[in-house]
Image (spheres, coloured by chain):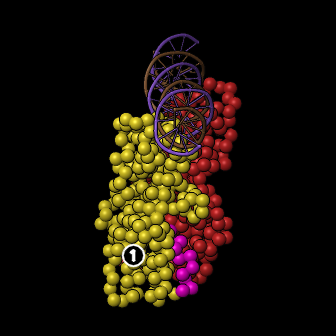
Chain colours: A yellow, B red, C purple, D brown
Amino acid sequence: MEGADANLLRRDTYRHGDLRRALLDVGVALARAGGPDAVVLREATRRAGVAPNAAYRHFADRRALLHAVCAVAQAALALAMEAELAAAPDGADAADVARARLRAVGNGYLRFAQDEPGLFRTAFAVPEALGSLAFPPGVGAGGLTAFQLLSAALDGLVEAKVLPGERRLGAEFLAWSAVHGLAMLAIDGPLRGLDRAQTDAVGQRLLDMVERGL
Amino acid sequence: MEGADANLLRRDTYRHGDLRRALLDVGVALARAGGPDAVVLREATRRAGVAPNAAYRHFADRRALLHAVCAVAQAALALAMEAELAAAPDGADAADVARARLRAVGNGYLRFAQDEPGLFRTAFAVPEALGSLAFPPGVGAGGLTAFQLLSAALDGLVEAKVLPGERRLGAEFLAWSAVHGLAMLAIDGPLRGLDRAQTDAVGQRLLDMVERGL
DNA sequence: AGTTTTCGGTGTACAGTGTCCACATTAGAA
DNA sequence: TTCTAATGTGGACACTGTACACCGAAAACT
């Protein structure tokens, strides 16, 4: 974690150095631990060792800070999906590979939700978080949004003749819905409390359904 | 709306009469307008024409009030699903009827989410809202939970030989995930802003996917 | 009936929050 | 070196949830 030392309480200079970054780091930590509601301006400034109002030099609002944290969370999600994609098998059959890549995308999503529930909820806490042009979403190492990673996987399915082209349009929303819904149910719905293995099992069945049904 | 006159500001007697009910009504109105975060204790007491602390005679906590509102929201969801079920076609082919009933359940869910986004979000705002035995969930007119309505529809599919029995176990979570995810995306995800017709179109495709993939 | 208990609403108070304003400090441009 | 713009501080206000002490009235028991 780079910049992890930026949120120190002790400070000798009047200026902080990189307060914006420090507040963002603290905000992410708060979101990680307690979800979107836990990212509290005063607590962030406190941990950064600075007066509450100092935050307003870097963020217009509490919401502005939350938006920034949200973007980081989305980036983390994209990264998790990329990691899963990188570990996907790269066999000979193009159809199998394409299917495996879609599964990897889904599994990355589900596992991120389970491993980082606070960040996951924060990623979707801001209404205008996704699809708004005024709000740049977080991207992974490859520069792609979570949504774009999913789109690419679906394109791969079409290319490998697994998915008929006429069903391609808007397929993102179908696949996304299924996985997003399961993630929600697993975080604080009736499926919470299940361990990783059990959630994975349900996840596999869900991905089966998506694969069959798309 | 019965009890709608219970939340009046004017009051001549020292006792309110049915403050618990009044607070609940106001809480539902707040949730309806602004989601879970909008159900604020002080505002509720204000609208009920009562001192802030009076609420504590009827609800242990702000969370307790929120739980109660949450149960009402779940009941409203179940009612919406029941309404859609009642309007489902009742043709001759048992398989078609069973399919139509599952679609009705899904459409009820999706339409409720779109028509009452505040209540919908409130219904799932409380972590222990679903599946906790300590927390009685809201039921519709028939006495069934939203979840139970879904279960019944799935049972119907099995009975009509549309769904093989070995795929029945846990199918609720798959169907629910898909529909719940789409509802979320339609409320404040990238699909918000779509009108009823467009959302319905995506909803139909999603239900197609579920039907094929279950 | 009259008395007492117990329920329900009030008032005051405190900690915590977001945010506004006026001010202080200092890094960097002039 | 001086001036200026950027950045952090202090104090204040309105708002929240919630605890404690109090009181008013309905109901229960003589």
Q: Is residue B23 above or below residue B167?
A: above
From this viewpoint, is residue A107 visible? no
| Helix, strand or loop status at disc 1 | helix
Q: What is the magenta segment's predominant secondary structure?
A: helix
Q: Quadrant of residue B99?
A: bottom right
Residue under the point 57% across and 85% down: A166
Residue under the point 37% across and 37% down: A11
Quadrant occupied by the C terminus of chain B: bottom left
Q: Is residue B25 above or below residue B168?
A: above
Residue under the point 37% across and 51% down: A3
Answer with left or right where residue B66 lies relative to residue B46: left
Q: Is residue A170 magenta?
A: yes
Answer with left or right where residue C3 lies relative to residue B23: left
The percent position of residue A82, horizontal first and vertical second, equals 39, 70
The percent position of residue B58, horizontal first and vertical second, equals 51, 35
Residue placed under numbered mark 1 in the picture: A103
The amino acid type found where label 1 is placed reads Arg
Q: Quadrant of residue A185?
A: bottom left
Badge 1 sits on which subunit? Answer: A
Q: Quadrant of residue C22?
A: top right
Q: Nearer the viewer, residue D18 or B141?
A: D18
Residue under the point 48% across and 67% down: A145
Question: What's drawn in magenta, residue-wise?
Answer: A165-178
Answer with left or right where residue B181 lies relative to residue B114: left
Q: Is residue A135 magenta?
A: no
The percent position of residue A200, horizontal first and vertical second, equals 34, 68
Q: Nearer the viewer, residue D19 or A128?
A: A128
From this viewpoint, is residue B199 visible? yes
Q: Nearer the viewer, residue A128 or A61?
A: A61
The percent position of residue B59, horizontal first and vertical second, equals 50, 37
Q: Is residue B97 above or below residue A179?
A: below
Q: Nearer the viewer, residue A125 or B92?
A: A125
